[in-house]
Image (cartoon, rainbow, N blue to C red):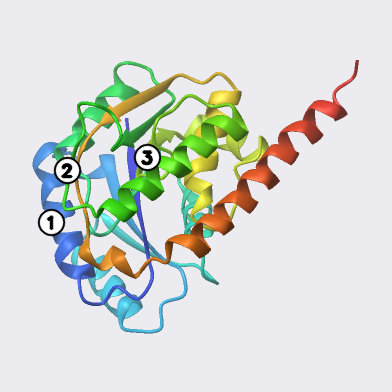
Amino acid sequence: MTFDVTIPVLNEEATLAQNVRILHAFLKTHFQEHSQWRIVIADNGSTDKTPEIGRQLMAEFPEVAFLKVPKKGVGLALKTSWGQSQADIVGYMDLDLATDLSHFLEAYEAIAHKNYDIVYATRLHRRSKVIGRTLKREIASRVFNLLLKIYLGIRFSDGMCGFKFLKRSVYEGLRQGGAQNDGWFFSTELLVVSEWKGLKIFELPVTWTDDTSSSRVQVIPLAKKYIADMRALRRKKFAKSDSLPS
């Protein structure tokens, strides 16, 4: 099966070239048929040299594409990339490569050979290994995922980890089902709507190394935004239920 790996980026000039080359070398080693895969750098509003570096990488590697998204938003970057994709599998990972690349093979196996619809990485499984994460961020993550379970009635363990892949054939149904957020919450929406629709979901415990720069994230404002996004998604679900004929 063919696949596109989208990397959403915003002002990543310091690490873009290095980490894309690492990912490219890994995929080239394990998927030697070059036409089978692409890395899509989806730039959503960078003001540094990220676009220039992205285009240089595209010129250097035929398997790398650069996509300029008109405004900021991780969800918007992913929707734009996947909406243009012709691959059998679409997905994304963070540029910091926090999720160990060996798990990519497990994700591909689950979809291509075990017929799962969507794969998500989890840092909260007992078999997961999390390295270098602060207590503050660990508590925030667990509280957020607990809120998801209580408020949206879902069962998956980790809605926030930046490593997810799905069959492109199910993406449009997820989008119409409510996965429409332009921001970070889009990643969580994919799983929520997948579960509501009864899709076949593969939970992937991972080795995950925290990026020290993630300390820039302001937990409380982000939590407030996520709670508002949860409410909006819940309203969509009940609005669809109310519109169905009795």
Query: Does the CB distance between marks 1 and 2 fall below 8 Å?
Result: yes
Between 221 and 92, the one lying in front of the other is 221
Q: In which quadrant of the rendered view does residue 54 lie?
A: bottom left
Name the spot of residue 81 as percent of width and height, x first.
46, 54
Kind of element beneath mark 3: strand
Examine the rendering and report whether any part of residue 138 can be seen: yes
Examine the rendering and report whether any part of residue 162 can be seen: no
Name the spot of residue 27 as percent of width and height, x first.
16, 44
The residue positioned 17% from the left and 52% from the top of the image is: 23
Kind of element beneath mark 2: loop
Q: Looking at the picture, does residue 85 appear above or below residue 198? A: below
**N-term mark: 1 or 2:** 1
The residue positioned 14% from the left and 37% from the top of the image is: 102
**N-term mark: 3 or 1:** 1
Q: In which quadrant of the rendered view does residue 7 lie?
A: bottom left
Q: Amino acid at mark 3?
A: Lys
The residue positioned 47% from the left and 45% from the top of the image is: 187
Q: Amino acid at mark 2?
A: Leu
For the residues marked 2 and 3, what is the alpha-carbon distance in whole angstroms? 13 Å
Q: Which residue is mark 1?
A: 22
The residue positioned 8% from the left and 42% from the top of the image is: 29
Q: Which mark is residue 164?
A: 3
Kind of element beneath mark 1: helix
**N-term mark: 2 or 3:** 2
Q: Which mark is residue 101?
A: 2
Name the spot of residue 116 as percent of width and height, x first.
39, 20
Q: In which quadrant of the rendered view does residue 35 lie?
A: top left
For the residues marked 1 and 2, what is the alpha-carbon distance in whole angstroms? 9 Å
For the residues marked 3 and 1, what is the alpha-carbon distance in whole angstroms? 19 Å
User: Quadrant location of the C terminus?
Assistant: top right
